[in-house]
């Protein structure tokens, strides 16, 4: 099965990763995202209008480009609030132009939406491992 990320240590208590998904989850993809993220940390899903009320700082942001009209502007907004934010963009229809624009403003990964939770897990895992400075355990 999957290896769990060794948790970042704060004092002597391990901390789980906090993951924020911004967009609308279709029922069939909700299961894929939950399966991919459940061993990695706590997942919260918010619709775009709810994001402005979100006060927490997250270890990883997942932005759904089918529900966010201007991905580069959203990435810049998150980066202004949290310069160290790690951001992944998920797309139903990725293009090199969209991915280039996202990378230019700070996205770390730009992936095609998949029902393969193992492929999604791999991307989430790699980005969280870098963020938390953790090793495979």
Image (cartoon, rainbow, N blue to C red):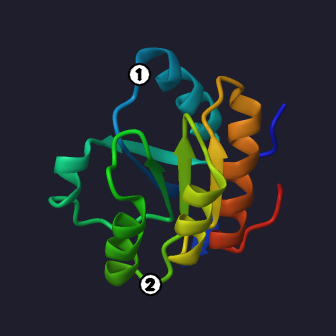
- Extreme residue in the top direction: 28
Measured as percent of width and height from the top left, residue 16 is found at 54, 56
**Residue at disc 2, secondary structure:** loop
Q: Residue at x 35, y 65 (%)?
A: 74
Q: Residue at x 63, y 54 (%)?
A: 110
Which image quadrant: the N terminus? Answer: top right
Counting residues from the N terminus, which is met first, the one under dot 2 or under dot 1? 1
Where, by quadrant of the figure, is residue 80 drawn?
bottom left
- Extreme residue in the front direction: 97
Give the Cα separation between the discs numbered 2 and 1: 30 Å
Q: Is residue 73 above or below residue 36?
A: below
Measured as percent of width and height from the top left, residue 118 is found at 76, 32
Residue 137 is labelled as none
Q: Is residue 13 visible?
A: no
Q: Residue at x 59, y 59 (%)?
A: 97
Q: Residue at x 54, y 41 (%)?
A: 91
Measured as percent of width and height from the top left, residue 54 is found at 22, 60
> How many numbered marks have been drawn onto this rendered protein structure?
2
Measured as percent of width and height from the top left, residue 96 is found at 66, 56
Nearer to us in this view, 34 or 26 = 26
Nearer to us in this view, 41 or 54 = 54
Check disc 2: other Cα within 10 Å, few if <14, some if 14-19, many if 20+. few
State left or right for residue 17 relative to residue 95: left
**Residue at disc 1, secondary structure:** loop
Which image quadrant: the C terminus? Answer: bottom right
Check disc 1: other Cα within 10 Å, few if <14, some if 14-19, many if 20+. few
- Check disc 1 and report the residue beneath it: 26
State left or right for residue 64 relative to residue 55: right
- Check disc 2 and report the residue beneath it: 83
Q: Is residue 106 visible?
A: yes
Nearer to us in this view, 50 or 114 = 114
């Amino acid at each position: 099965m999957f290896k769990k990320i060794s948790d970042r240590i704060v004092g002597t208590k391990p901390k789980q990763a906090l993951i924020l998904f911004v967009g609308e989850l279709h029922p069939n993809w909700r299961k894929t995202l939950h399966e991919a993220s459940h061993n990695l940390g706590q997942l919260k899903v918010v619709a775009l209008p709810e994001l402005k009320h979100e006060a927490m700082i997250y270890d990883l942001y997942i932005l759904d480009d089918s529900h966010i009209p201007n991905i580069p502007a959203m990435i810049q907004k998150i980066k202004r609030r949290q310069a160290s934010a790690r951001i992944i963009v998920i797309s139903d229809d990725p293009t090199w132009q969209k991915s280039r624009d996202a990378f230019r403003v700070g996205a770390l990964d730009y992936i095609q939406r998949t029902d393969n939770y193992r492929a999604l897990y791999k991307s989430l895992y790699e980005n969280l491992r870098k963020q938390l400075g953790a090793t495979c355990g």
